[in-house]
Amino acid sequence: MSNSRSQAANFDLGHIGWRYYNQIKKKAVEQEFSWSGLAFSLSIAFFIVIAYAQGLSLLYHSLESTREHQQLLNQKIYFLEQNDLINPQLKNNSFNTLLAIKTTNTAALNCQKKITSWS
């Protein structure tokens, strides 16, 4: 802990500048170039880019399908409202049809109960 404090306290802000940058640049140029290091760095970068591309593609397709689903629901609601406005009697007719079907089914069940009770 004391070493880090002394190093932080001894930090010389005079090294920050073009002269210090040129010294670092000179040291970097003097070092030996490594093809294996370059290949390793590029392969890591390639896989990182592929992973982010897959993530963005998944996000895009998810948002797009949600948007299309919402548009489909809005379109269905619009068509239902449009049919009610164009032909309001259709709404009553469909209700009456459902009521007639229910009444017919109830009558058929009552007849079936009577037949089974006779036998």
Image (cartoon, rainbow, N blue to C red):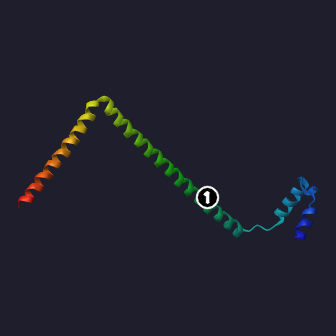
| Element marked by disc 1 | helix
| Residue with the most extreme left position | 119
Q: Identify whether 97 is placed above or below 18.
A: above
**Residue at the spot 67% in from the left edge and 66% down from the top edge:** 39
Q: Quadrant of the N terminus?
A: bottom right
- Residue 32 in the image: x percent, y percent? 79, 68
Give the total number of marks visible in the rendering: 1
**Residue at the spot 38% in from the left edge and 36% down from the top edge:** 78
Indicate the quadrant where residue 20 lies.
bottom right
Out of 79 and 110, give the one closest to the viewer: 110
- Residue 72 in the image: x percent, y percent? 40, 43
Q: Quadrant of the C terminus?
A: bottom left
Q: Is residue 103 left or right of residue 62?
A: left
**Residue at the spot 32% in from the left edge and 33% down from the top edge:** 84
Say which amino acid is labelled 1: Val
Out of 32 and 92, give the one closest to the viewer: 92
Disc 1 target residue: 49
Q: Identify whether 81 is placed above or below 37.
A: above
- Residue 73 in the image: x percent, y percent? 40, 43
- Residue 82 in the image: x percent, y percent? 34, 32
Q: Is residue 49 left or right of residue 68?
A: right
**Residue at the spot 69% in from the left edge and 70% down from the top edge:** 36
Q: Identify whether 99 is placed above or below 32.
A: above
- How busy is the neighbourhood of tag 1: few (under 14 within 10 Å), some, or many (20 plus)? few
